[in-house]
Image (cartoon, rainbow, N blue to C red):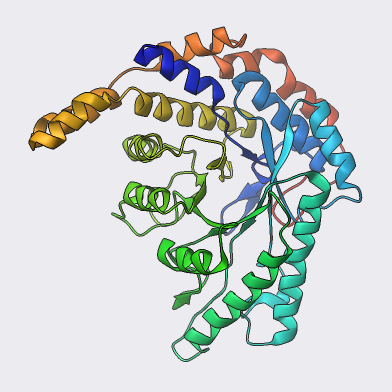
Amino acid sequence: MTELAAAKTALKTQAVETPSWAYGNSGTRFKVFAQAGVPRNPYEKLDDAAKVHEFTGVAPTVALHIPWDRVDDYGALAIHAEQRGVRLGAINSNTFQDDDYKLGSICHPDAAVRRKAVDHLLECVDIMDATGSRDLKLWFADGTNYPGQDDVRGRQDRLAEGLAEVYERLGDGQRMLLEYKFFEPAFYTTDVPDWGTAYAHCLKLGPKAQVVVDTGHHAPGTNIEFIVATLLREGKLGGFDFNSRFYADDDLMVGAADPFQLFRIMYEVVRGGGFTPEVAFMLDQCHNIEAKIPAIIRSVMNVQEATAKALLVDGDALGAAQRSGDVLEANAVLMDAFNTDVRPLLREVRQEMGLDPDPVSAYRRCGWAEAIVAERVGGQQAGWGA
């Protein structure tokens, strides 16, 4: 099989999970902006997600966020997803939108609050059982604002204790993905601030615990691809939350700020054997001022483009240059792949998959955007906290 044919085959198997919350209303820290036609419940979120998969062919699963996506019958929700041509994916917990969590959740100094937080995480595992979901994704806003506010080491002990209880509840084929965030909302210490802290906890927990890398959650200048390579080498990279950022935080479309960085990350994924179902590729971004479904489609396409370029790196030429110490040639091999226009290749891949070669234009022609504006009248639109 030629390099190009192999790249095509790999691209046809790619899967990018979309997040339910990206279809709802979102905004800045100051204002949530409403858009016409936004889903009013998890069922309508799945309807929109199905359109993304229909036109990209590589977005077969949808992540849920609890309690934002809480329903009475998760089995029925899973059936609805399957009827629309998608499946339910990761279950994301929420331990940051309750007054009780002002001083933390799973790391809170009050045992009663910690119990409440852990019970919520256990509820999320129950939902995984009902939906057939594989991944429980955890992000904690826990931390402190002032020196002396709480015992830093004690908070790590509480974190370990809570994670261990949830870990023991996981069933066969289920796993825990622990996310980290450099800062925010805590200003002095964050309880899971970096990949090393997440890795240390996951290593102690066992093989069902892995680290998830959010591409927007790092200090400026951090070499994210090094983190990816290291976690892959250790067998602890569970997945990604793809997004982009210019300054401090995430939520822009993946690849918007630094497409070269996304390519470098994807190269390490491919080189390290991470282009498999065992590494979950999920978008985690909110679209505040742009139309939501087209933005999600474009984001999926951005991931595809970075992946295609990574797959086209001439491994033999790169290895030879590295072994000979030819620094400039090694860099040139990578840059040749990055500078390749892979859009024609991806158009061919989509046509071979029976898809329109231009997913965004195909979506705009299908009439869905106009239909949901006309039909989704009344009720409460979904959004942060709903």
- Residue 25: give x, y in percent of width and height: 68, 45
**In the image shown, does 65 or 235 lie closer to the viewer?**
235
Query: Residue, x 47% and y 92% (percent of image)?
Result: 148
Query: Residue, x 49% and y 38% (percent of image)?
Result: 253
Query: Residue, x 64% and y 54% (percent of image)?
Result: 175
Query: Residue, x 65% and y 26% (percent of image)?
Result: 52
Image position of 336 with respect to 278: above or below? above
- Figure disc tally: 0
112 sits left or right of 145 in the view: right
18 sits left or right of 270 in the view: right
- Residue 263: give x, y in percent of width and height: 35, 34
Residue 379 makes an appearance in the image: no
- Residue 224: give x, y in percent of width and height: 35, 50
**In the image shown, does 76 or 383 lie closer to the viewer?**
76
Which quarter of the figure is the N terminus placed in?
top left
Image position of 200 with respect to 215: above or below? below
- Residue 129: give x, y in percent of width and height: 80, 51
Q: Give the image quarter of residue 334.
A: top left
Residue 148 makes an appearance in the image: yes
Image position of 98 with respect to 360: above or below? below
